[in-house]
Amino acid sequence: MALKKNLKIAISFIIVAVLFFLLFRKLDFELFEKYLAEGNKLLILLGVFVYLSSFAVRALRWKVLLKHIGNFKVRELAPVIVAGYAVNNVLPVRIGEIVRAAIAGKLFKISIPATFASVFVERIFDGLTIALILSVTIFFYPFQENMKMLAWGASLFFALLFLFALVSAFSPKPLAFVQFIRSKAPKFSMPLFDFAEKFLKGAASLDSWQKIFATFFLSLGVWAFELAVYLLISAAFGVRIPFVGCLVMLCAANLGMLAAPTPAGLGVFQGAIVFALESFNVPYEQRMAVALILHAAQIVPTTVIGFIWIWVKNLSVGAPGTVS
């Protein structure tokens, strides 16, 4: 088991190396260093502050989703979320989401599967919000047809997930149906049914229309903070693009990150930003400067703060999903 986990980690770092090789091979390093040196440090620090502030909104959203389990304070939940992000930043395939649920289960004495299910519902709302932003952006920017198809496909996918979650929240029939099919299915398909059951149990947190609307508007708030970070870092490097350009960057980076196999989406994030800014005739070296610093502004502070908090709380993050 340990060998399998180590192999996955090794493969993810090989992917990072390949992606960065492809990104850096045509870079004019002298010009790139010039853009980095001229970056406005005050705007970059402001971007870091805004990004860290977004965790208060994320914690408030999680508080809403955990209301059926217990009444938690924002100041209790925010560091747990940061810790989950910290683990995500050093390990592949979003293991930090499982670790976040495990930490919350240990600290608050609550069900780890139910907590993980609430995190899963968060991701549905994040995907739905990004898909909504992308769908709106299509009307203001002349994307190529293949990009439009991708945008509508992503929007439809998350809309269907959301509708299914709504049905599951107000009716036990979808869960009963999945459990019935599971009892007849072959053993090799069990992981798929595990995933489906977690999804459906997570939907139970959406047990009122007030909670659904609150979660949706808080999700908009989360992404408004994130967009502000993109605007600030772009301005720090003198990137002059219309507002819609930052929306394109936000959507490209985060849709890419949803399935990124690398820690913190390294390589995938930078590639998405470079690709998104290409449409606005931004020089390649300037795009790379924005991509690297924008990502660093998000992952460096959360990783440092998250692991310091884990250390202060004397938590030992072992195998995925275990905390001692």
Image (cartoon, rainbow, N blue to C red):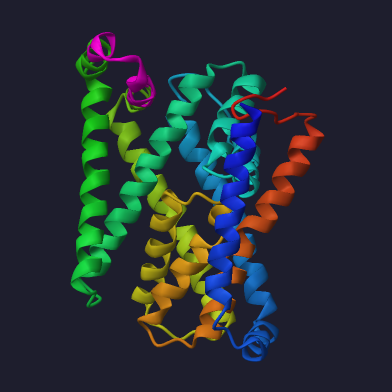
Please say whether residue 263 is visible from this viewpoint.
Answer: no
255 with respect to 27 (left or right): left
Q: Main secondary structure of the magenta part?
A: helix
Quadrant in the rendering for residue 79: top right
Q: Which residues are magenta?
A: 181-197
Q: Residue at x 44, y 62 (%)?
A: 253
Q: Nearer the viewer, residue 29 or 300?
A: 29
Quadrant in the rendering for residue 184: top left
Q: Residue at x 59, y 21 (%)?
A: 105
Q: Residue at x 56, y 28 (%)?
A: 101
Q: Nearer the viewer, residue 83 or 76?
A: 83
Quarter of the image for the C terminus: give it: top right
Q: Nearer the viewer, residue 306 or 79?
A: 306
Residue 145 vertical placement versus 310 (above, below): below
Residue 247 vertical placement versus 121 (above, below): below
Q: Is residue 187 magenta?
A: yes
Q: Residue at x 70, y 85 (%)?
A: 37
Residue 269 place in picture, x, y as percent: 50, 62
Residue 53 place in picture, x, y as percent: 59, 54
Residue 235 place in picture, x, y as percent: 53, 80
Quadrant in the rendering for residue 48: bottom right
Please say whether residue 157 is visible from this viewpoint.
Answer: yes
16 with respect to 164 (left or right): right
Numbered circles on residues, count:
0
Quarter of the image for the N terminus: give it: top right
